[in-house]
């Protein structure tokens, strides 16, 4: 279980997140908020890239930074801006990242993942010729390399076409039974059908961490998109 | 019912918390040392992959160093001002490969935007940076040996061993400062240090170069040997701390 306990994150005088309490067990968690609400800040904290100013993040009761590489061993992370070397092919890049993730004999795993994200045909092509969507799919594949117990995906569907988004949703749903999948998005349809819980922030505070149905019922909304508009309508416009 | 069995004294909440803490502490992984990270990463990545994405940076740095050496050798041969202070000039320019390679590699990783991703891997950007820094030092050391040999052959007044020790001292002093700066700037070798290095030594060079050269010439080989050893030890300790602190160093509040 991944626990966010009384977490506040400040950047100078700016409070990005205030007194957040969350618990993640296996399943898909969708972080749904407008840009600038603190989704990426939370994800970076869960990926040990930044630390809370106050509070702590625990995995099975232990601070994630104390777990150090043991935590990163079970972590898959796709940053919002996925970086890559343009002169590398997906296979070369995934082999490089496999070594940094300490994965033994990764070739078969890389083949499977490139198949899963429909990049098998271009696996030896240099990534400088790839579209944004193809790069994003390489990013998704690398996040899954170590078969992570905790998968953190920051706006994973950015740049994907509708067909790929459907394919991505199915992939995530199939993975979510025995692991924690946390994905951030501001596209409601990305998570509506697959998220066990939807996490919403407002004014940098936690507003909801409930199932889509519960949120809709509480707000009297017909669907999650309506609920989102009720909460963030003015901000989103 | 046997009441004695039901009256078994149970641990208090404090005792339970203490036991849990003890189990967790014993179960936590020990921090990896520099040597173990270097060995494991070199084994996993292979020498080629250690420089993945930044191989061109290492080559540019190497080219810069070779050109720099020939320019200096030309000045030396033409009996220009540098001939009056060869030790000082050597001390100033020795870390050229090391600083260029580190800064170019950090710049390229920044441009490619891979640092966040690498920081979330088991072997992180900090581990990789430390390994690359160690290897860049090694390459710089290998470049210093023929340079010192050529200079000592070119001039009877210059001692090979002293040239070598002056160069090594300079390299390790610079490297130790670089490692020190890593703690302040998360994991990026900073551009500030080379600017300060060349500015300070350049000012010394233009203002009191002869005095500085005399000072360096008068120092014994033993002094340089000690200087080299001390700075090398500080450098290794700093890199080791950097590797052991792991994730803690990346997060900046």
Image (cartoon, coloured by chain):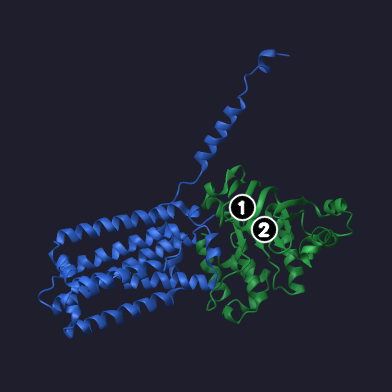
Chain colours: A green, B blue
Say which mark, if any, is on residue B44: none
Q: Is residue A74 placed above or below B89 in the rendered structure?
A: above
Q: Position of residue B239 (x, y in %)?
A: 38, 57
Most distant residue in the front direction: B207
Residue corresponding to mark 1? A9
Q: Quadrant of residue B141?
A: bottom left
Q: Nearer the viewer, residue A52 or B167?
A: A52
Residue located at (53% from left, 63% from top): B118
Give the x, y percent position of residue A105. 53, 63
Q: Residues within 10 Å of mark 1 (few under 14, many from 20)?
A: many
Q: Contact (CB < 8 A) between labels 1 and 2?
A: yes
State the residue in front, B113 or A194.
B113
Q: Quadrant of residue A76?
A: bottom right
Question: Taking the image as drawn, is residue B69 in sight?
Answer: yes
What whole-number distance in Å separates the C-alpha atoms at marks 1 and 2?
Answer: 9 Å
Whether callout 1 and callout 2 share a subunit is answered: yes
A77 vs A219, left or right, is left
Residue at (61, 42) in percent of width and height: A61
Label number found at residue A38: 2
Q: What secondary structure is marked by label 1?
A: strand
Q: Nearer the viewer, residue B253 or A129?
A: B253
For marks 1 and 2, the one nearer the N-term is 1
């Amino acid at each position: 279980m991944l626990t966010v306990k009384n977490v506040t994150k400040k950047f100078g005088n700016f409070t990005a997140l205030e007194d957040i309490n969350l618990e993640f067990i296996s399943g898909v968690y969708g972080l749904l908020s407008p840009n600038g609400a603190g989704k990426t800040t939370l994800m970076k904290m869960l990926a040990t890239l930044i630390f809370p100013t106050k509070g702590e993040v625990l995995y099975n009761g232990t601070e994630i930074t104390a777990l150090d590489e043991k935590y990163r061993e079970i972590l898959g992370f796709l940053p919002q801006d996925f970086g890559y070397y343009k002169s590398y092919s997906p296979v070369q890049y995934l082999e490089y990242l496999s070594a940094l993730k300490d994965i033994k004999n990764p070739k078969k795993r890389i083949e499977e993942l490139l198949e899963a994200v429909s990049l098998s045909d271009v696996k030896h092509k240099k990534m400088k010729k790839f579209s944004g969507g193809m790069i994003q799919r390489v990013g998704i594949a690398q996040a899954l390399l170590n078969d992570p117990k905790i998968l953190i995906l920051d706006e994973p569907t950015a740049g994907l076409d509708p067909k790929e988004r459907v394919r991505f949703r199915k992939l995530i749903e199939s993975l979510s039974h025995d692991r924690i999948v946390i994905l951030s998005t501001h596209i409601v349809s990305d998570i509506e059908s697959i998220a066990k819980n939807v996490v919403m922030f407002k004014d940098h505070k936690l507003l909801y961490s409930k199932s889509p149905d519960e949120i809709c019922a509480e707000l009297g909304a017909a669907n999650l998109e309506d609920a989102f508009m009720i909460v963030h309508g003015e901000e989103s416009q | 019912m046997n009441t004695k069995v039901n009256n078994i004294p149970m641990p208090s909440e404090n005792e339970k918390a203490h036991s849990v803490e003890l189990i967790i502490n014993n179960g936590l992984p020990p921090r990896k040392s520099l040597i173990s990270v270097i060995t494991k990463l070199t084994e996993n990545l292979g020498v080629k992959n250690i420089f993945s994405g930044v191989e061109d940076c290492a080559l540019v740095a190497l080219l810069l160093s070779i050109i720099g050496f020939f320019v200096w050798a030309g000045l030396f041969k033409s009996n220009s001002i540098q001939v009056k202070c060869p030790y000082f000039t050597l001390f100033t320019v020795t870390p050229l490969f090391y600083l260029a390679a580190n800064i170019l590699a950090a710049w390229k990783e920044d441009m490619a935007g891979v640092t966040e991703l690498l920081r979330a891997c088991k072997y992180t950007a900090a581990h990789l940076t430390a390994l690359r820094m160690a290897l860049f030092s090694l390459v710089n050391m290998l470049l210093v040996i023929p340079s010192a040999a050529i200079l000592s052959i070119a001039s009877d007044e210059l001692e090979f061993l002293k040239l070598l020790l002056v160069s090594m001292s300079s390299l390790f002093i610079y490297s130790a400062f670089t490692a020190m700066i890593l703690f302040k700037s998360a994991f990026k070798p900073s551009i500030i240090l080379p600017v300060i290095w060349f500015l300070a030594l350049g000012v010394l060079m233009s203002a009191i170069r002869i005095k500085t050269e005399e000072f360096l010439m008068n120092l014994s080989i033993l002094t340089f040997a000690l200087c080299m050893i001390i700075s090398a030890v500080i450098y290794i300790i700093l890199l080791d701390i950097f590797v052991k602190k792991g994730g803690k160093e990346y997060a900046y509040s």
